[in-house]
Image: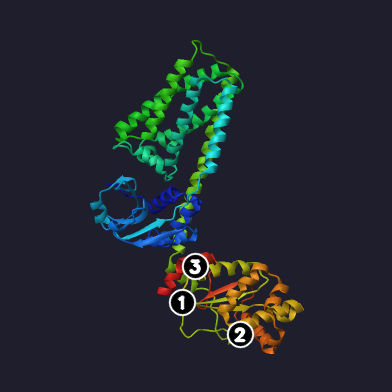
């Protein structure tokens, strides 16, 4: 029983089945760079980050609700390795990653924890609309140019060949394509990846069957359209028949390589070969007796093929470089997102003192103390406030405390702005930092001084001590060499500049447990 899949593959398949729309690349990147990937916690954190609704249960197989048809879990194999699995239940039959599995085997591998996505019942209107428009356009085109049934069949074969060659190319680029893998696994001795990417013959290091196929079929589409628009169909047929004859050595080489060198079959490659053969038979049916050649058209067609070839080589190089860069970035971020690495980097940064009497600390001694140096009129401070507030909502109040410090020279402010700062500071003084930090949310929602003063200002409550607090905060910032806003400190250490504030999501639980 072959269940081995990556967590990313399995989860994305489940998300697709649940009709949940996400940015696949961003989701995969976020998941793979999680410091605890591929654990269950990495799945949960990533789903939470993308605001995907889900439920987690600890249960036995027998107790799963009859209405549940799909769920994600981790199964344990004979070597005690955890295998990410999408379990499907249909008519009391079980499948794990699309492979039939008995209830006894599932029980043997069971780990009790399951995750269920709350499916979104949404129609794929955009996809249906796109297909409808494309179908209408092709129908109109074929009717306008009087394309007969054999020409239409030939065009369908070109499209089929292009689709198969795209799947083959994706193997060369190491893309995880579920559908392509399914096609390749039709044969028990099938291994497309091994055949397509093997370099036992030096010839395949220069150009491989997948690249040749892709360039051939994409060029055929362009020349097919040119032929019917400019009415030189007979030349198109003669030219393509010649190319199909010339492709015979490549076909024989591919079959020989699969059979005798690799000893494995590439279903995609065989599909492309069959498509080329059917193209040849179709041309034999529709081809007139006389071959038609035109030197100007010959140069045009050859130019199309050469342009497509060099464009594809250049574009593929960019795709390979991008994939390499992405893999490198994933590995780097997974390193940076490790808690011990973050903690070590954090403790090498600036360390503040807590001599400011205004900074308050609860008696419960929480695991996390945040000190936020901010300014109500600072745009970046607003962004940081929203991000930090979102993170703190997920933490139990007893586990953290926050101090807010203003880094402003109150004597240089206008009368109205000075009153705003004094009102905010008084609110801190009377209600505490925790309350005030949450109230700042109201300010950032409108940033209207007049409205804030109307709702919060009572000038009778403001005295000289309030202004003194603001001056002490400014001096404290100066003493700690904090001459900018915003600045965030965690347990006295400045949050590292190489991290984004959202990375804190990865470390909160570790901070609390540390």
Q: Secondary structure at mark 3?
A: helix
Against 26, residue 511 (above or below) is below
Earlier sequence position, callout 1 versus callout 2: 1
Contact between marks 3 and 1 (CB within 8 A): the answer is no
**Residue to which mark 1 is pinned:** 399
User: Foreground: 346 or 163?
Assistant: 163
Q: Residues within 10 Å of mark 1 (few under 14, many from 20)?
A: some
Residue at the image point whose x is 43% and y is 48% from the top: 17
Q: Is residue 97 visible?
A: yes
**Residue to which mark 2 is pinned:** 430
> Which quarter shows the C terminus?
bottom left
**Residue to which mark 3 is pinned:** 504
User: Foreground: 16 or 23?
Assistant: 16
Earlier sequence position, callout 3 versus callout 1: 1
Q: Position of residue 498 (x, y in %)?
A: 53, 65
Residue at the image point whose x is 54% and y is 14% from the top: 292
User: Disc 2 versus disc 3: distance between alpha carbons?
Assistant: 30 Å
Q: Residue furthest right?
A: 415
Q: Residues within 10 Å of mark 2 (few under 14, many from 20)?
A: few
Residue at the image point whose x is 55% and y is 80% from the top: 352
User: Disc 3 versus disc 1: distance between alpha carbons?
Assistant: 14 Å
User: Disc 1 versus disc 2: distance between alpha carbons?
Assistant: 22 Å
Against 50, residue 407 (above or below) is below
User: Foreground: 188 or 458?
Assistant: 458
Q: Secondary structure at mark 1?
A: helix
Q: Nearer the viewer, mark 1 or mark 2?
A: 2
């Amino acid at each position: 029983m072959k269940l081995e899949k990556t967590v990313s593959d399995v989860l994305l398949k489940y998300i697709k089945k649940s009709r949940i729309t996400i940015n696949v690349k961003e989701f995969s990147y976020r998941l793979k760079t999680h410091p605890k990937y591929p654990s269950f916690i990495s799945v949960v954190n990533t789903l939470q980050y993308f605001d995907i609704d889900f439920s987690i249960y600890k249960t036995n197989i027998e107790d799963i609700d009859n209405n549940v048809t799909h769920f994600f879990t981790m199964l344990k194999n004979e070597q005690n390795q955890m295998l990410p699995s999408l379990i499907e239940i249909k008519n009391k039959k079980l499948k794990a990653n699309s492979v039939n599995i008995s209830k006894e085997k599932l029980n043997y591998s069971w780990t009790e924890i399951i995750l269920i996505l709350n499916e979104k019942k949404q129609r794929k209107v955009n996809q249906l609309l796109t297909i409808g428009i494309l179908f209408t356009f092709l129908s109109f085109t074929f009717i306008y140019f009087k394309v007969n049934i054999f020409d239409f069949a030939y065009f369908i074969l070109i499209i089929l060949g292009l689709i198969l060659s795209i799947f083959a190319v994706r193997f060369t680029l190491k893309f995880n394509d579920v559908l392509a893998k399914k096609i390749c696994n039709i044969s028990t001795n099938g291994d497309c990846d091994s055949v397509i990417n093997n370099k036992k013959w030096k010839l395949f290091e220069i150009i491989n069957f997948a690249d040749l196929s892709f360039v051939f079929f994409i060029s055929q589409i362009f020349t097919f359209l040119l032929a019917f628009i400019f009415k030189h169909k007979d030349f198109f047929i003669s030219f393509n028949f010649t190319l199909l004859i010339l492709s015979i050595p490549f076909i024989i080489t591919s079959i020989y390589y699969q059979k005798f060198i690799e000893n494995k079959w590439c279903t995609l490659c065989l599909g492309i070969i069959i498509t080329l053969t059917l193209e040849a038979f179709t041309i034999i049916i529709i081809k007139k007796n006389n071959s038609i050649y035109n030197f100007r058209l010959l140069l045009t067609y050859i130019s199309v093929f050469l342009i497509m070839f060099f464009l594809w080589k250049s574009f593929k190089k960019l795709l390979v470089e991008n994939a390499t860069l992405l893999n490198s970035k994933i590995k780097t971020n997974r390193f940076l997102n490790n808690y011990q690495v973050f903690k070590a980097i954090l403790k090498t940064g600036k360390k503040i003192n807590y001599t400011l009497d205004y900074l308050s600390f609860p008696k419960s001694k929480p695991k996390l103390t945040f000190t936020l140096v901010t300014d109500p009129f600072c745009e970046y401070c607003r962004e940081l406030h929203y991000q930090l507030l979102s993170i703190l909502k997920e933490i139990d109040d007893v586990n953290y405390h926050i101090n807010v410090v203003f880094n402003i020279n109150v004597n240089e402010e206008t009368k109205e702005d000075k009153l705003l700062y004094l009102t905010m500071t008084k609110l801190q003084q009377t209600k505490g930092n925790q309350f005030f930090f949450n109230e700042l949310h109201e300010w950032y929602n409108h940033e209207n001084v007049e409205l804030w003063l109307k709702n919060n200002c009572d000038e009778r409550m403001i005295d000289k001590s309030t202004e003194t607090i603001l001056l002490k905060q400014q001096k404290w910032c100066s003493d700690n060499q904090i001459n900018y806003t915003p600045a965030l400190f965690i347990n006295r250490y400045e949050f590292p500049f190489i991290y984004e504030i959202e990375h804190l999501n990865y470390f909160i639980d570790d901070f609390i447990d540390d």
